[in-house]
Amino acid sequence: MKSTFLSFTFLALTLGMVPGKANAQTSNGRIQWSAASKLTWDDFQGAPDATSGDMASARFDIDGGCVGDANGKITPRVMFSFSKLKSWKKAAKATPELLQHEQGCFDIGEVYARKLRKELAIYANSHTFSETAKTEAQQIRKRIADEAHDLVNQYENETNNSRNKAKQAAWTAKIATMLQDLPEYASK
């Protein structure tokens, strides 16, 4: 069995700054999603959990938030990345099929990062900075996080963590289609 940890962190809606986006591969052990590059087993650098029955564990983070300027204009910021240092694999179980499955989890996270970018952009265009806006933006983030969590769980269950080859192939095609949506909100 394989586990994926998908975390959503909401950076508070403030008049301050949200940390800038890093390059696709960063020095802090994080990789931003890119259509041009795929995960490799070398990206899974964390120590395997010897007590876990999982074959691998991948850690992805979607950090979402907004900044407001002095005029009340809201600018959304959403960053999506893979944590190399918190992700691990058991070398004997690190098959190409499992890696493809892990890539699917990462791709699902990107789909939901795009959804969060879109929804926060729509929200920002019709609201101004306020405590109410902060609360409502957090509710959007939580709803998107819950949807992503549910879909990753469905993916894990239906594919039996990559073991069900037919379901894995169907999900790989489904995820590829999902990635074609919202290209204007893709990680850059």
Image: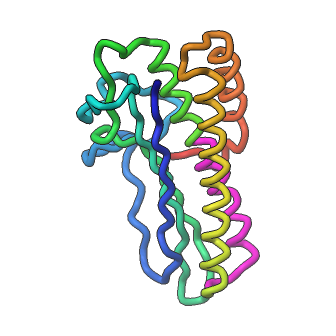
Q: Residue at x 61, y 13 (%)?
A: 164
Residue 170 percent coordinates (x, y): 70, 18
- Which secondary structure type mostly characterizes the magenta part of the structure? helix
How was the colour assigned to the protein in this rendering? rainbow
Residue 16 percent coordinates (x, y): 43, 80
Q: Is residue 74 in the magenta section? A: no
Q: Residue at x 67, y 59 (%)?
A: 143
Q: Residue at x 26, y 29 (%)?
A: 50
Q: Which residues are magenta?
A: 110-129
**Front one among 66 and 183:** 66
Q: Is 168 left or right of 88, judged from the image as shown?
A: right
Residue 160 percent coordinates (x, y): 58, 21
Q: Is residue 161 above or below residue 32?
A: above
Q: Is 162 left or right of 38, judged from the image as shown?
A: right
Residue 163 percent coordinates (x, y): 55, 14
**Front one among 98 and 43:** 98
Q: Is 45 left or right of 180, judged from the image as shown?
A: left
Q: Is residue 86 above or below residue 95?
A: below
Q: Is 17 left or right of 172, judged from the image as shown?
A: left
**Front one among 103 and 184:** 103
Q: Is residue 126 in the magenta section? A: yes
Q: Is residue 158 above or below residue 185?
A: above
Quarter assignment of residue 41:
top left
Quarter assignment of residue 39:
top left
Q: Residue at x 45, y 20 (%)?
A: 99
- Give the total number of marks visible in the rendering: 0
